[in-house]
Image (cartoon, rainbow, N blue to C red):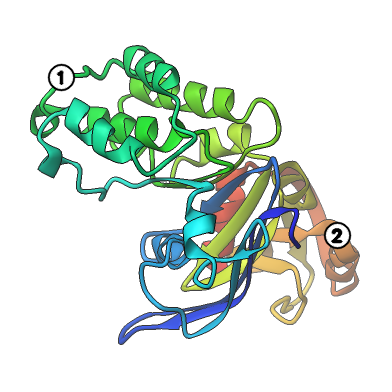
């Protein structure tokens, strides 16, 4: 839809040893969306496709209703992009990089940029090559934020950051989206922070989306069930059941409660001994482990 910040439909991309998709993903306008998955799951590939770094095999990518290739220039003006792999050192000093970068964006705000440099402890005249890894990440964030983009694409923006730097980055991101108009797609392995920070989550594994939805609803939708059966039983054919452990007739399983799955499990002979809620991290590990 045109009012969605990002809409991906049926996206596929095949490489020699990896296949992405089909991926369907929607970032509503004003949402903070966390894209999570193991290493090699397809997170960076998906973001690269949005940025036009590689041609998709099939599917569509819309940025505020704009085709990411056919209307590339207009679409990219509305995006701020951060990645640990951004090549920044070629410009020598921070001021040269900023002066080059700002020329592409009519909405660039010098005062805001200088304020971000100060708050994130990056010097105007610093040599980029001598900056720590964390400082270079923060410099990339400053470049992404200073033109007030409508959509932030953040590929592992907190990887390798110490706790203080990580807190600084999250503070600036929350400030940037406080008005509810800007949207964020962030990929990260830090599931504890994403559970608190995001309002939407997508879980991707082996190139395919396992789940997508509002963070709180997704976490509340599942529970961990411990139980036992009086005789041999199988639960593999029940949709929404993800067996985690079995010891004889004792079972531990993740259960999707949204469609009466727990009642189906009981009907097949499981006596429930306990039910516990799950965190986002526990949900993620259980889904990937089962897969």
- Count numbered badges in the picture: 2
Percent across and percent down for residue 24 are 64, 70
Q: Nearer the viewer, mark 2 or mark 1?
A: 1
Q: Is residue 231 left or right of residue 62?
A: right
Residue 289 lies, in percent from the top left, at 51, 64
| Residue designated by label 2 | 258
Contact between marks 2 and 1 (CB within 8 A): the answer is no
Q: Is residue 139 left or right of residue 284?
A: left
Q: CA distance from mark 2 to mark 1?
A: 55 Å
Mark 1: few/some/many CA within 10 Å (<14, 14-19, 20+): few
Q: Nearer the viewer, residue 200 or 263?
A: 200
Q: Residue at (90%, 71%) from the top-left corner?
A: 267
- Residue 58, image x, y percentages: 54, 84
x, y percent for residue 78 = 54, 47
Q: 192 left or right of 32? A: left
User: Is 183 rendered above or below residue 40?
Assistant: above
**Which of the 4 image quadrants contains residue 255?**
bottom right
User: In the rendered image, is residue 244 in sight?
Assistant: yes
Above/below status of 168 relative to 101? above
Judge from the rendering whether residue 259 lies leftward or rightward of residue 20; answer left or right: right
Query: Which residue is painted at 26% across and 48% down in the image?
Result: 86
Which residue corresponds to mark 1?
A: 125
Image quadrant of residue 8?
Answer: bottom right
């Amino acid at each position: 839809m045109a009012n969605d910040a990002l809409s991906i439909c049926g996206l596929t991309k095949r490489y020699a040893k990896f296949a992405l998709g089909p991926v369907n993903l929607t970032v509503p306008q004003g949402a903070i969306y966390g894209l999570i998955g193991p290493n090699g799951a397809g997170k960076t590939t998906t973001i690269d496709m949005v940025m036009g770094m590689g041609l998709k095999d099939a599917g569509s990518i819309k940025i505020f209703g704009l085709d990411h290739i056919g209307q590339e220039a207009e679409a990219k003006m509305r995006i701020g992009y951060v990645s640990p792999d951004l090549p920044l050192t070629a410009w020598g000093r921070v001021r040269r990089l900023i002066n080059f970068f700002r020329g592409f964006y009519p909405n660039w705000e010098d005062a805001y940029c200088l304020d971000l440099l100060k708050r994130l402890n990056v010097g105007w005249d610093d040599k980029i090559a001598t900056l720590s890894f964390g400082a270079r990440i923060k410099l990339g964030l400053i470049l992404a934020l200073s033109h007030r983009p409508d959509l932030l694409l953040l590929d592992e923006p907190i990887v390798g950051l110490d706790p203080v730097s990580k807190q600084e980055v999250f503070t600036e991101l929350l400030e940037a989206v406080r008005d509810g108009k800007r949207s964020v797609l962030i990929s990260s392995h830090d599931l504890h922070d994403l559970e608190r920070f995001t309002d939407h989550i997508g879980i991707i594994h082996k190139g395919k989306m396992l789940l997508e939805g509002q963070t709180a609803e997704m976490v509340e939708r599942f529970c961990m069930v411990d139980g036992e059966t009086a005789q041999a039983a199988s639960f593999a054919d029940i949709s929404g059941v993800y067996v985690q452990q079995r010891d004889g007739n004792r079972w531990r399983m993740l259960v999707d409660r949204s469609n009466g799955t727990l009642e189906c499990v009981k009907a097949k002979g499981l006596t429930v001994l306990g039910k516990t809620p799950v965190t986002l991290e526990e949900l993620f590990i259980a889904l990937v482990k089962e897969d």
